Image: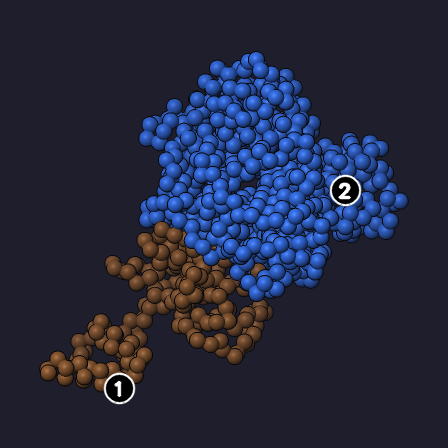
Chain colours: A brown, B blue
Amino acid sequence: MSSGLKPKIIKDIKVDVDKCTGCRACEMACSAFHAVPKYSSINPSKARIRVIVDELRDVYVPVRAGDCAQAECNGRELYIINGKQYDECAFCRVSCPSRDLFKEPDSGLPLKCDMCEDDPPLSEPMCVQVCPHDALTYEEREGEGEEEKPREELEIGLEALSTKHGLQKVMDALGRMSVSKKG
Amino acid sequence: MRYTETGFNLEIDLTRGNIERVETDPGLTEIHLGGQGTAGKILWDRVPPEVDPFSPDNLLIFSTGLLNATPVPGANRTVVNTFSPQTNLFAHSLFGGYFGPELKHAGYDKIVIGGKSSSLVYLWINNDKVEIRDAGHLQGKGCQETAALIRQELKEPKAQVAAIGLAGENRVYMATIDHANSSASRGVGVIMGDKKLKAIAVRGTKGINIARPTELFELCNRLRKEIYENPKCGDPMAHEDDETFHLDNFAWGNARERKKGYWNEELEKKWAALTRKVRDRETGCYNCPKTCHAVIKWPGRSRYFLKCFNKLTYLMAAHKELEFNYDILGVTQEYGLDGFSTPQVIAFALELYEAGIITDQDLPGFPPDVEGRFYWLIEKIVRREGIGDILANGVYWAARQIGKGAEQYDHNTIKKFEQVTIKLGKVNPPYFLMYATGEKMNITQIEGSYPQDPLPAMEERERFVKDWVAAPNDKFKQMFLKWEKRNDLPLEASCAICDWNEMMHYIDDAIGLCGFLSSFRGQFGGRIPYHTHNIPDLISLATGMDLDEDRLWEIGRRNRNLVRALNVRRGLRRKDEKPPEDHWKIRDPEMETRLLDAYYEFKGWNNEGIPCKETLDKLGLDYVSEDFIQRSILTDNESIPAKKASALNAKNRVRGAGGGYE
């Protein structure tokens, strides 16, 4: 490979809803792993995975927290799968205003699954490790393209500033700063 | 900081509509752990023996177990205690599912409910916000239906709900409190109904702290894997197609007839195919890798969960087949009727009808077929209509209300409570003691650690004891090696076995561990997940308490004696400690007297089964012995067979973890 970069690895968790027993060990373990200090507090409402359960309809869907949306969507489709009715929200990973899933209960800030990134890395994300029924299985596959080069901290900071103030303003400010330094 | 506990109870007075959040004494956790242990203390302090179970002064207590909401797999059981109108004694009940952990995350270790509401209400606990809400629109609704409606109206799909059905609302003694895949039976649903509390909904978003987090979490991950892989724990019968154990060994009808050889290959094929067709899924309780509760979708009924042996109880009572049982459960579970006692009450009524003790006059419109009669009586019972009003009081009371010789048909109750339908040949001595002296009304809540039968060959016994991790000490292994005939066990061994069996339940019921992983599983040998050797460590890691095996046994004994004391204060005496006459075909009254004498002595109780002053004082239950003396239940100078008792007790106890066993 000319650039010397590794092929892009996509980490994923496959969900088999038929195998879920509804035990919610994934929620417990996720909240423990992300507690500070690690494992010191158990709180499923802080978990980045929740099992959406509707006993009467036999719906058991583990959902991992994805991106955050500022507004709720307007689609509320109903799906019938093998004779069971699922609400579209049962599969949706978004932290959105229409439901209290995937929000830090005290601050309301959105939560997002980070695949339990750790140093040294875990063999599998914690939710997968505590699911012996394989309702959750970990997968790594090669995606198209190449692994992104890790960005420098400065670059991330500048991007955040330009998102907030606009790129032009940031460049202007940098320009002024460099002029005043020279002067 | 409190670990594993929230440090607060919720106190509800339904008469005045008062709600309080009350800080608890951490000292009580040290001496009772939690769950049923601390609930027993509250009942002792606040419900004097004069209080009728239907009085507003009776309390209904929902307790989390000490280890609920920790990473400990299978520690999810909620304990419900009150005084039962059926027995007029302490009511012991448990349910699994997700309620206990949710209650802790809402910030409470217990809900203590007193008083009586004037109209049907439900309780909504949403962290610090707690409301008593009108439940008029939920009147007559099924248990699961109620849960679904409450979640909908609160817009809280994550709320955990425990509810009663029509049976509880109408104060049927066999009423349960239902939650998700579990039910609480044995006399608690009737009190919830009496207090006009239709349901409790809980939602909690707070954290529970762990004292030594990394060690506990890693240990629990190993345990979870072991539990998943161990076929001997959980409820193996929930997955097996072979029903020989219950069908061939338990009695059918009104606990009358054993049908040895009933089960055959053809039936197994037929029933297995039926179950596969209607079983949607197998579910587990909170943070447990086992799948003990199948989801059943029977045509024309809403989905429900199978609970233990209730897959067979109705069909055995009615002499019918599996289709009947699956169909009727779809009705009875929504009504919130206990699947153990209800079929017995109905089978008892059918016997009375056949004997002409109750007649068509008592049963207007009684259908001609057995199935029809079951459904008909269910409807009468849950509404307390006509004969149903009498049958709703359980076999014991119904027999006495009906009279005309009906008492003769009440042959399977102890302490006025319906027992499992087992009728055997010769007495198994520890079982005699467990049936007689048990405070938890059902043998399944007392037995489970020591095997029910000896193994025929010495080689098999040796293999069994070799990796029998649950055995508290070598003494039990020696007993098992020497055990030849079921009915032949020395007095001392019988006492020790009964003591160990019941002690394991007292421990589980304080910490919220499921018996299917612990107290009910030692009897199968091998590496069961929880036993007296590793429970102290788990509690220490989770709570930060300094606990060893000796102290765990001491706490178990304290809780056991406190429950005993609650019942003694309400009048329980030796005369009440009698298994049904026909439980065993061959009885030996002299031997039974000797056994009971020996057991009372072993426990440090007097000849009436009352804990002696010295026994109580040693356990720090001085306030109990003082009360007993004041009430003349004990006399001041009553001597106890104490020396012998404490010597026996010491023998049964293990030494500290590292110290080797006797």
Circle on res. B32: none
Q: Is residue B645 visible?
A: yes
- Relative placement, left or right, of B560 versus A116 is right
From the image, tell me which residue sits under label 1: A168
Residue A52 x/y as whole percent? 50, 63
> Callout 1: helix, strand or loop?
helix
Q: Amino acid at mark 1?
A: Gln
Residue B161 x/y as whole percent? 58, 55
Q: Amino acid at mark 2?
A: Leu
> Callout 2: helix, strand or loop?
helix
Residue A162 x/y as whole percent? 28, 80
User: Quick one: B658 or B92, which is closer to the camera?
Assistant: B92
Query: Chain for mark 2?
Result: B
**Quarter containing the N terminus of chain B:** top left
Residue found at x 67% / y 60%: B301
- Relative placement, left or right, of B136 versus B59 is right
From the image, tell me which residue sits under label 2: B391
**Crowding near pointer 1: few (<14 within 10 Å), some, many (20+)?**
few
Q: CA distance from mark 1 to mark 2?
A: 84 Å
